[in-house]
Image (cartoon, rainbow, N blue to C red):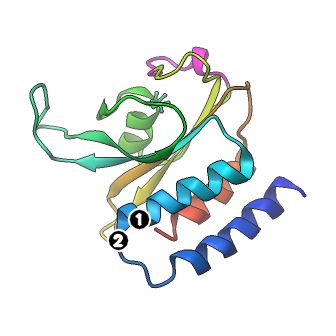
Amino acid sequence: MQKAEQYDLLYRQLAALLEGETDPVAKMANTAAVLHESFGFWWTGFYRVTSHRHSGFDPESGELILGPFQGPVACMHIPFGKGVCGTAWKRGESVVVPDVEAFPGHIACSSASRSEIVVPVFGPDGKVVAVLDIDSDKLGTFDEVDREGLERIVGLL
Ligand code: SME
């Protein structure tokens, strides 16, 4: 099956699975599971924008905190504008990184990660409420097909 077809199928499966569910964490958890299982990614998960305060927290900008995911243990806090995730949040747009070593400021949660895509999740007011982060252990895994497919899928959240 072509990747675009696979995304279309997953979109329809997730639309049915998430229909009527209002809890954002439950929806993110099953979205991460479906994507991770279907494509066999290295790491698939969400970081949520939070204003929760802890030592070292920057109240000016807030930060991303680890949310539902599938895969190995990951970093728990990512500042605004930092790493691929913080950059996607700041720009309010998806970021595709074919080679993480070539992305200045990339946050290496795992040395096995070689390429990455981060897609923002928007709330009803148009602000970024979370990001979907997917890592691959191979170079150049993600392209425009992934970006389009994943942007459509996060629209279900
Ligand atoms: N590499 C990400 C950090 C999150 S982990 O990959 C799960 C980044 O640079 O934002």
- Specify whether 67 is left or right of 58: right
Mark 2 lies on residue: 23
Q: Which residue is found at the position 12% from the left and 25% from the top?
A: 56
Give me the C-alpha separation between circle 2 and circle 1: 6 Å
Secondary structure at badge 1 equals helix
Q: Which residue is found at the position 64% from the left and 54% from the top?
A: 35
Q: Nearer the viewer, residue 103 or 156?
A: 156
* Residue type pointed to by label 2: Asp
- Specify whether 156 is left or right of 21: right
The 10 Å Cα crowd at callout 2, few under 14, some 14 to 19, many 20 or more, is few
The 10 Å Cα crowd at callout 1, few under 14, some 14 to 19, many 20 or more, is few
Relative height, residue 130 to residue 5 (above, below): above
Residue 144 belongs to the span the image colors magenta? no
Q: Which mark is residue 26?
A: 1
Q: Which mark is residue 52?
A: none
Query: Residue 136: image x %, image y %?
Result: 66, 32
Query: Residue 27: image x %, image y %?
Result: 45, 66
Q: Is residue 100 visible?
A: yes
**Callouts 2 and 1 close, C-beta under 8 Å:** yes
* Residue type pointed to by label 1: Ala
Residue 102 belongs to the span the image colors magenta? yes
- Specify whether 85 is left or right of 56: right
Query: Residue 54: image x %, image y %?
Result: 10, 34
Q: Give the residues in magenta.
A: 99-107
Secondary structure at badge 2 equals loop
Query: Residue 29: image x %, image y %?
Result: 47, 58
